[in-house]
Image: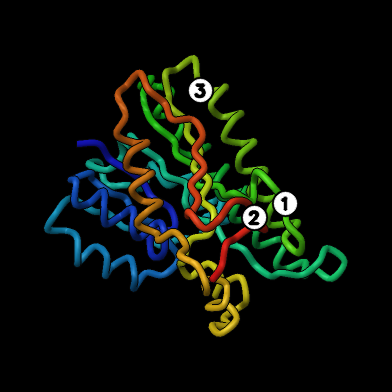
Amino acid sequence: MKTVLITGATSGIGKATTELLAAIGFKLILTGRRNDRLLELKENLSHLTDIHTLCFDVRDSDFIENLVSNLPDEFKKIDVLINNAGNAYGRDPIHKGSLADWENMMDINVKGLLYMTRAISPQMVERKSGHIINIASLAGRETYPNGAVYCASKSAAKAATDGTRKDLNPFGIKVSCIDPGLVETEFSEVRFHGDKETAAKVYQGYTPLTAFDVAETIEFVLSRPAHVNIADTLVLCTDQAASTIVRKE
């Protein structure tokens, strides 16, 4: 069975994907910044498959550079990389934005994705096989007010995906991008810096996607035959037509 490395595995889309792929039997390397959650996942799912956990921040380029060499031998061969780790911070207009929020988004959503791809892709090139799945966003396709930097970070993630696909095409490596719209996770709570009341309002009046909806899309992309690559996928809830168009009751 293939080995899959998932970043940001401790919540939301990453956690749902972990649970789904574990049930299918993929060997999993789970990464995240909250070790207690990683250990809980391992304890709950280890009866289904082999799991290795790594607690680190995708902004830590020094750790990531040595990631593969420090893995146990049975986990060194990584067949699939799912770059899921990402965050949004703040909903300020550009002239009032927090530089710390901007740096967090660019460092995690763009540089973290690139660091992980740089660390894992060489072994895929050597084997001439592998699959990289990047989780971007509808925000990478269209901008909206008070989200310029988040949109820019996800647009950069999409551009990096497209460029990576072209770079790795000679080696038979699949590279896919999945762009979810509104998904009810901890996303908005993080964006509003822990303000749960404001975060909850984001998902009121309509039916958003669940993390499992996106996990099922990831599993579908991952399970296509060797000659099929789902290169780019936009996933919206039925009530959403665009970033700023949501049917609410």
Disc 3 marks a residue whose amino acid type is Leu
Query: What residue is shown with label 3?
Result: 168
Whether tag 2 and tag 1 are in contact, CB under 8 A, the answer is yes
User: Does dot 1 land on a helix, a strand or a loop?
Assistant: loop
Residue 230, numbered label: none
Q: Residue furthest left?
A: 47
Looking at marks 3 and 2 on the same chain, the residue that comes earlier in the sequence is marked by: 3
Quick check: 230 left or right of 91?
left
Disc 1 marks a residue whose amino acid type is Thr
Quick check: 38 left or right of 200?
left
Q: Residue at x 71, y 69 (%)?
A: 91
Looking at marks 1 and 3 on the same chain, the residue that comes earlier in the sequence is marked by: 1
Real-space Cα separation, disc 1 to disc 3, in angstroms? 29 Å
Q: Position of residue 124 (x, y in %)?
A: 40, 27
Q: Position of residue 9 (x, y in %)?
A: 38, 58
Disc 2 marks a residue whose amino acid type is Ser
User: Does dot 2 land on a helix, a strand or a loop?
Assistant: loop
Which mark's residue is nearer the viewer, 2 or 1? Answer: 2
Q: Residue furthest top?
A: 170
Which mark's residue is nearer the viewer, 1 or 3? Answer: 1
Looking at marks 2 and 1 on the same chain, the residue that comes earlier in the sequence is marked by: 1
Check the picture and name the quadrant holding the C terminus. Answer: bottom right
